[in-house]
Image (tube, rainbow, N blue to C red):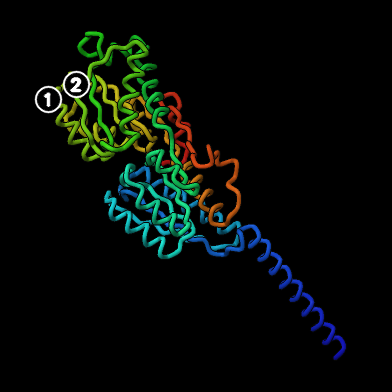
């Protein structure tokens, strides 16, 4: 009996030793895969916590990191702070990330022309920076080989926005609906993002140029900056309606949030003959407006793709491993995710995607 008991103890000891060996092997494998790091710390500074699109990018960064934690058995701490549109506040936030010795810092710049302070702070501490969504000046990005940018090409979104307009106007019946006064010229207003934002500047200029190049005559009645804000866009649109009323035949908005603000104003006024309206981003509510034919279309901006790219680069830099080819890094520092057109014909497809 005693011999059987001793044999049982021996078997249990062997089993425990095998389990410990397996766990040790798993730990070593995980450490090898993660550059011997079991905790990764990523600091994220967002220019405005109320911006729908940039907030959605952060959501996808956090989602990717949570999935990576489960896959690799490590901890990834993502600290997100908002600068509230104040560059000095953002500078202080980056300094705190540096003091805490974070592995990577991700910055959605307040002022794209004023990145030098942030770059110097990070470079002195040898902490890589991933700038995103608000592209800094090219000369600044080239100041150090540990600076990266993730975003999209604003020219592409402007060309696609113009294509939505020109495709609609090529339909004779639709043109007659839009050209309310029948003069053969489309009178329009523009709701712009921010004065210093590259995307706003490019979308405004290129979209109109493309419409003209397609052979359509247009006349600008007015343009106003609404700062990507729905409430501000509603206020600006009400002012346009006070001044131009039924003369407005087309509304070009630099993003969906401002397009929705324009729609709010039109609905409040009870306008019956709606202008042709286009936006950019692919917000869920904008997609619903397209289904209801209150918007002609929008240009889908891939928040998920950008969020995942930021997270993948941050993870690779933190673990000192190679950035995957699938990220699509250009010139060892740029990632540009593609846009796509959404209109009434394909809006159902985009509505099935996880929106924001």
Residue labelled with disc 1: 243
Location of residue 341 (image quadrant): top left
Q: At 56% from the left edge and 52% from the top edge, which residue is drawn? A: 316
Quarter of the image with the C terminus is: top left
Which disc, if any, is residue 136?
none
Q: At 37% from the left edge and 42% from the top edge, which residue is drawn? A: 53
Could you say whether the residue bearing mark 1 is in a helix, strand or loop? helix
Q: Is residue 245 visible?
A: yes
Quick check: 14 left or right of 214?
right
**Depth check: 198 or 300 in front?**
198
Location of residue 287 (image quadrant): top left
Q: Position of residue 152 (x, y in %)?
A: 43, 35
User: How many marks on residues?
Assistant: 2
Residue contact at pointers 1 and 2, CB within 8 angstroms? yes
Could you say whether the residue bearing mark 2 is in a helix, strand or loop? strand
Q: Is 106 rendered above or below residue 236?
A: below
Going from N to C along the chain, the mark reached first, 1 or 2, is 2
Q: Position of residue 29 (x, y in %)?
A: 68, 61
Q: Residues within 10 Å of mark 1 (few under 14, many from 20)?
A: few
Q: Is 113 rendered above or below residue 12?
A: above
**Depth check: 113 or 223 in front?**
113
Location of residue 226 (image quadrant): top left
Residue that extends furthest to the left in the rendered view of this protein: 242
Q: Position of residue 215 (x, y in %)?
A: 34, 10
Residue labelled with disc 2: 221
**Depth check: 53 or 207 in front?**
207
Quarter of the image with the N terminus is: bottom right
Q: At 43% from the left edge and 51% from the top edge, which residue is drawn? A: 106
Q: Residues within 10 Å of mark 2 (few under 14, many from 20)?
A: some
Residue that extends furthest to the bottom in the rendered view of this protein: 2
Q: Is residue 1 visible?
A: no
């Amino acid at each position: 009996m005693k011999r059987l008991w001793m044999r049982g103890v021996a078997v249990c000891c062997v089993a425990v030793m095998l389990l410990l060996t397996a766990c040790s092997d798993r730990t070593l494998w995980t450490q090898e895969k993660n550059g011997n790091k079991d905790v990764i710390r990523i600091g994220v500074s967002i220019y405005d916590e109320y911006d729908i699109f940039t907030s959605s990018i952060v959501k996808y960064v956090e989602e990717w990191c949570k999935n990576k934690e489960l896959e690799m058995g490590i901890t990834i701490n993502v600290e997100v702070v908002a600068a509230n549109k104040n560059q000095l506040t953002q500078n202080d936030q980056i300094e705190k990330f540096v003091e805490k010795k974070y592995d990577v810092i991700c910055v959605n710049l307040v002022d794209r022309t004023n990145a030098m302070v942030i770059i110097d702070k990070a470079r002195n501490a040898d902490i890589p920076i991933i700038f995103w969504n608000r592209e800094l000046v090219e000369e600044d990005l080239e100041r150090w080989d540990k600076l990266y940018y993730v975003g999209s090409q604003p020219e592409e979104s402007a060309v696609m926005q113009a294509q939505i307009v020109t495709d609609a106007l090529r339909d004779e019946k639709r043109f007659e609906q839009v050209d309310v006064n029948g003069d053969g010229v489309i009178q329009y207003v523009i709701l712009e993002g921010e004065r210093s934002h590259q995307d706003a500047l490019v979308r405004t200029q290129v979209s109109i140029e493309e419409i003209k190049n397609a052979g359509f005559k247009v006349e600008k009645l007015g343009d106003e900056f609404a700062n990507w804000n729905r409430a501000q866009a509603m206020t600006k649109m009400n002012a346009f309606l006070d001044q131009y009323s039924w003369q407005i035949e087309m509304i070009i908005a630099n993003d969906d949030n401002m397009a929705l603000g324009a729609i709010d104003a039109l609905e409040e006024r009870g306008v019956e003959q709606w202008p042709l309206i286009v936006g950019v981003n692919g917000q869920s509510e904008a997609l619903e407006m397209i289904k209801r034919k209150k918007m002609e279309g929008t240009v889908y901006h891939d928040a998920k793709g950008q969020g995942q790219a930021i997270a993948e680069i941050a993870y690779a830099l933190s673990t000192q491993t190679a950035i995957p080819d699938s990220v699509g890094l250009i010139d060892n520092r740029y990632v540009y995710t593609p846009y796509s057109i959404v209109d009434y014909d394909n809006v159902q497809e985009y509505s099935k995607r996880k929106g924001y």
